[in-house]
Image (cartoon, rainbow, N blue to C red):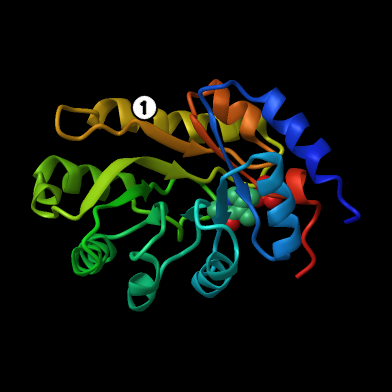
Amino acid sequence: MSAVNITENFQKVTSSIPEHVTLVAVSKTKPNELIQEAYDFGHRDFGENKVQDLTAKAEVLPQDIRWHFIGHLQTNKVKYLTPFVYLIHSVDSEKLLREIDKRARNNGRVQKVLIQGAISSEETKFGWKLEELSTFLLSGVWQELANVEIVGLMGMASNSGDTDLVRSEFRRLRDFRDEHQSEGLELNTLSMGMSGDHPLAIEECSNMVRIGSTLFGPRNY
Ligand SMILES: *Cc1c(COP(=O)(O)O)cnc(C)c1O
């Protein structure tokens, strides 16, 4: 038995979020045994933020797991993910999007992706600046990329106890989504919210939450 009670934690979290919200269990730094326990509980969506960890885990864990890549992605590592990964949450540049398209084409797949929008006032280095993203989306250039499907947006709010600030950051992404939603570009997935802030994110229309420590216990790096 592990020190964390996986079944209890998953029961608690799944019963606390609405049914239309997809729970991505962030298993980064956690051993395969804990992921297997969650799998045996019935969970299938897991998130990792390092390419090497994700591919190593995918190799030995059940094949029907839906793997979500949630970390910063370097273009030279895209090729390790596109053969099988379910959803890449963290596309932050046109260059990266084009590389995913190219590699997915080689794999004979259409890769589902989210664009990570920069919404946090603290961590401006993460994500695509919304003004630039707007220009890109309105340009329609993404239509040429037949092997990527942009299904929505991802955002990380400031790591702050200021709930007004956090809420306004989530709302900014949601408003951006609503403004850029169109026929041919259906940004239906809003991946927002982690252990500390997912209730706020869900209030701001998140329908995919990425939760790690509440499910698997704190991480020791
Ligand atoms: C680690 C991580 C999470 C989960 O964080 P917790 O606070 O443990 O729930 C969510 N999203 C991203 C991008 C992460 O890197």
What's under tag 1, amino acid-wise? Asp
Please report the residue visible at 70 percent of the width from the left and 46 percent of the height from the top: 40
> Would residue 147 appear left or right of 215 to someone viewing this image?
left
Please report the residue visible at 18 percent of the width from the left and 48 percent of the height from the top: 136
Please report the residue visible at 72 percent of the width from the left and 38 percent of the height from the top: 161
Label 1, secondary structure: give it.
Answer: helix
User: Looking at the picture, how far across and down is residue 99, in whole percent?
Assistant: 24, 68
User: Looking at the picture, how far across and down is residue 132, in whole percent?
Assistant: 24, 50
Which residue is more in the foreground, 198 or 25? 25
Please report the residue visible at 24 percent of the width from the left and 28 percent of the height from the top: 181
Visible residue check, residue 171: yes
For label 1, the residue is: 175
User: Looking at the picture, how far across and down is residue 78, in whole percent?
Assistant: 35, 70
Q: Quadrant of residue 202?
A: top right
> Would residue 173 appear left or right of 56 to someone viewing this image?
left
Q: Is residue 168 above or below residue 157?
A: above
> Would residue 50 appear left or right of 36 to someone viewing this image?
left
Quick one: quadrant of the N terminus? bottom right
